[in-house]
Amino acid sequence: MGDIVLSIVAKLAEYTVGPILDHARYLCCFNNIAGNLPNAKEELELTRNSVKERVEEAIMRTEIIEPAVEKWLKDVEKVLEEVHMLQGRISEVSKSYFRRQFQYFLTKEIARKIEKMAQLNHNSKFEPFSKIAELPGMKYYSSKDFVRFKSRESTYENLLEALKDKSACTIGLVGLGGSGKTTLAKEVGKKAEELKLFEKVVMATVSQTPNITSIQMQIADKLGLKFEEKTEEGRAQRLSERLRTGTTLLILDDVWEKLEFEAIGIPYNENNKGCGVILTTRSREVCISMQCQTIIELNLLAGNEAWDLFKLNANITDESPYALKGVATKIVDECKGLAIAIVTVGSTLKGKTVKEWELALSRLKDSEPLDIPKGLRSPYACLGLSYDNLTNELAKSLFLLCSIFPEDHEIDLEDLFRFGKGMGLPGTFGTMEKARREMQIAVSILIDCYLLLEASKKERVKMHDMVRDVALWIASKTGKAILASTGMDPRMLLEDETIKDKRAISLWDLKNGQLLDDDQLNCPSLEILLFHSTEVDFDVSNACFERLKMIKILAILTSSLIWRRRELMKPFGTSYLSLSLPQSMESLQNLHTLCLRGHILGDISILESLQALEVLDLRNSSFIELPNGIASLKKLKLLDLFNCVIREHNAYEVIGRCLQLNELYLCIYLCAYEEFPHNISLSRLERYVLNFKMYSQSWTDMMEEHRPCRALCINGFNASVQSFISLPIKDFFQKAEYLHLRDLKGGYENVIPSMVPQGMNHLTFLILEDCPEIKCVFDGTTMQTEDAFSSLVILRLYELDNLEEVFNDPSSRCSLKSLEELSIESCRQLYNISFPKNSKLCHLKFLTIDHCPMLTCIFKPSIVQTLELLEQVTISDCFELKQIIEEVEEGSVDYVSSQSHTSLMLPKLRTLTILRCHSLEYIFPMCYAHGLASLEELNIGFCDKLKYVFGSEKEHDLRVYQHQSHPQTNIHINFLNLETLRLTELPNLVEIWPKYFDPHLPNLKELQCIDCPRLPDSWVRRVMIIDSDLQQDSTTTVIYFSKMIISLMAHN
């Protein structure tokens, strides 16, 4: 009984004494508690910044942020804003005569805010933080090459019906190479995905030599599956478990032989109905051996369809000469209905004379290649004709050169150039720039003739596998025989009797790195020798090259040309491959191009002896030192040391003496010399990519996508303004197309004119990051050069703590006529962008402004008139932003101009996002609403003072008065493309548009309104009444309005 009494007493004390002590603290400890507030706020701000950095990194990795993280950030922004206001009240109370009366309640609120911030800090560890965004699936593939033919409708429908029949787990699509199997399979996959026959549709390319790991990785990538297993068998088991979950359609393209599904990880038994397979193949035997339940044959095109396809590609119309059409029909007959032959021959002959067409027909009829299968003779002859009809000799040579790459390989045009230059192909003599121009013309010719195809990435091409077969056949027939193989043991070369006649040997994905042991390869005519492996160290015998004196190109590779850092190169964390250079390399005195990529090379002094060398590519390799003798190689034009580890001595001194260079690609890690080489002067350089200590994902992404000719990326450049003008490095700055500077020092308050007084008219990309001395980017007050930044396409400014304005151009010397993207983030002192007065932003498409708390306005009306292509605007965390478009006085020149051009304002704007701009009272003046015909998505959130979306308060009051006087004059506004309208936490929003607006929203699909307490319910009903279309043939979208859940009828 006593214990119970004691327990009750203790509990009573807890509920009485504790609160009494708290109240006493609130009365007596105001200064102590208030003094803790700034520290708590600063700690939370640091945590918030750390979380936001993680968010940005996750977004760069195309990951989706977890809702809990987004909610936490929203809560933090809210409490920080409340603390900011609380600090203002503290300051006011401290000065007040009656401060004692208010301190109790204020101290209590401060304590609660400190506790809230501590709680948010404590809850800032998120697991998981983000997740990988799903890939687009079959939507990724374009339908531009798909032509719907009547004879193929049944094939298309049969494939779909077979997919609907769940008993048919494996379906074979059989047809001749180049008949259109891949294109049709993609279209069927897209339709199956659209009809939701499967939860996932995944396409993987198999090729003539199946690579189990490659197939597994292709499927896993598109399923969002990450392998931890290191072996093929382990990955197969993991993939099988994933494919047994849900329903998946696998399209296995270009299957040449029986595939072991179990080895890949594809479930295959009677009990598994969730995984369907379509395989495309040239052989019915493959379908039978793989026990396809349904085999569907894709026939060649019928006569009329072949003729229609040929006319489309040869540009034959009803007005074309009769004689030309007569020859054309005969050529179509010779193509035998093969789609790829029809397309390539038609494209080749487009625009040619009747005589050239007659000659083409004669060649087709006379062509009888006996060394190819009978069924392929006509298509081979057709594709061979495309080659014969090429008038550009460089294009012909490049076509054959492309066949040294494996099937389905995406050929980097830079690799093609370096190999073509080494071969001395027609048109590649003279300067490197001239050779590149000739190469670009030749590649364009091949693409136009469909002998090359555009790949998934810019600056890459690929070959249809049948076209590649034809190229190998032509090379053999013309005395330029090529041995191109995948997975072959190089020692087998010694047993091949035909090897002595080869002009090129290209072995990919080697599993054995012993290159010929001590035997010598007897290939007196060999000009190209290429070995590739990502798995094995290369062991090159000392005598390997002694009898290969005619070699012009030697490439021992672990990868194609890539820009990533070395630790990202290898799957499963494997290390560099080792390679020792043999003494017999001295005999390669005819060697023009040497590529040794991704190797631990050790001593490379032997390279000093290669006097004919024009291209030296050591990208992603490691070696002891750069030999001094490199500077003595008089013919050396291109030096690639990108992502190289050079362990000893100052490589920059050697490079500085290479005055003969036309091209330099430089990014050295762990170099003994760690200062930026200000004194490098290479006057003959036409192209350069120089990276000094700038290791960022954005850099590699940019190089992969854009490939600028002259790029300069420097972290920690530190040369004074006074000395910079006399440094040789200044020429690199002035000629650069891409310039990325981080932590710039030396007293530079601007880029132009402090760094480059003459302007930067070649510059297309400019990125400034964490440069605390920069106050503006362009200062035209002392400039003499006209039209600075005339070629600038992308401008990104990050964390420039003292940037006050971007442009200071009273003389209007900066038009920005090419600018497409402007991003400004975390520039805390920026008060005005100050677009140049006469700037014409007619190409600006993307505008992002984030965390610029002092910025008050963005555009003047005169600038808005030039924004003809602006598509996307995102403005966030600009707390002092009062106007997006500057408000001008009625009657002023700007006002009259803005009123007279409103129908042309922002005609291409698709997405507008405004977040956490707490001083903003309206988004756009009402006159701009008419021009937003392309607007698809409008997101506005967390703007405390926002009252209106369209129209200022003055405009609303004036127009309401006018409407009361003339109630019949409603204004009709068409938002024909608006699909999404989201309004979130806008406590003072009272209207989206005025009452006298009749908005037409025929395509609105999503309407979301959260925590907008002053916005009346009537505006939702008004939208539904005005747009009667919303109430028919529709589905229900749930929206949130204040504390109610409303169902709004919206189109599918």
Image (cartoon, rainbow, N blue to C red):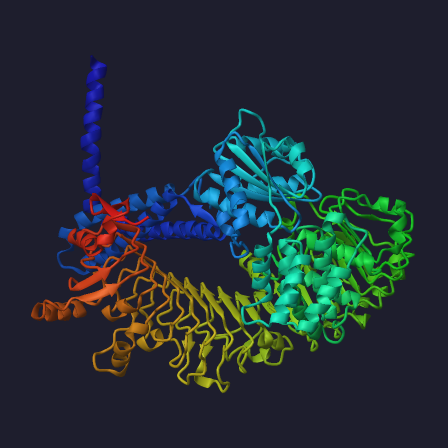
Please provide percent x and percent y for residue 692. 62, 63
Q: Nearer the viewer, residue 624 or 275?
A: 275
Residue at horizontal 54%, vertical 83%? 758
Q: Is residue 157 above or below residue 990?
A: above
Q: In the shown orientation, is residue 832 left or right of residue 380?
A: left
Please provide percent x and percent y for residue 768. 50, 67
Please provide percent x and percent y for residue 581. 83, 54
Residue at horizontal 25%, vertical 79%? 895
Residue at horizontal 37%, vertical 42%? 68
Q: In the shown orientation, is residue 266 left or right of residue 1032?
A: right
Residue 656, picture quadrant: bottom right
> Residue extending furthest left?
965
Q: Is residue 893 above or below residue 377?
A: below
Residue 838, picture quadrant: bottom left
Residue at horizontal 49%, vertical 37%? 161
Residue 238, picture quadrant: top right
Q: Nearer the viewer, residue 74 or 933?
A: 933
Q: Nearer the viewer, residue 112 or 587?
A: 587
Residue 669 in view in this figure: no
Q: Nearer the viewer, residue 426 or 1043?
A: 426
Residue 1012 in view in this figure: yes
Please provide percent x and percent y for residue 536. 75, 44
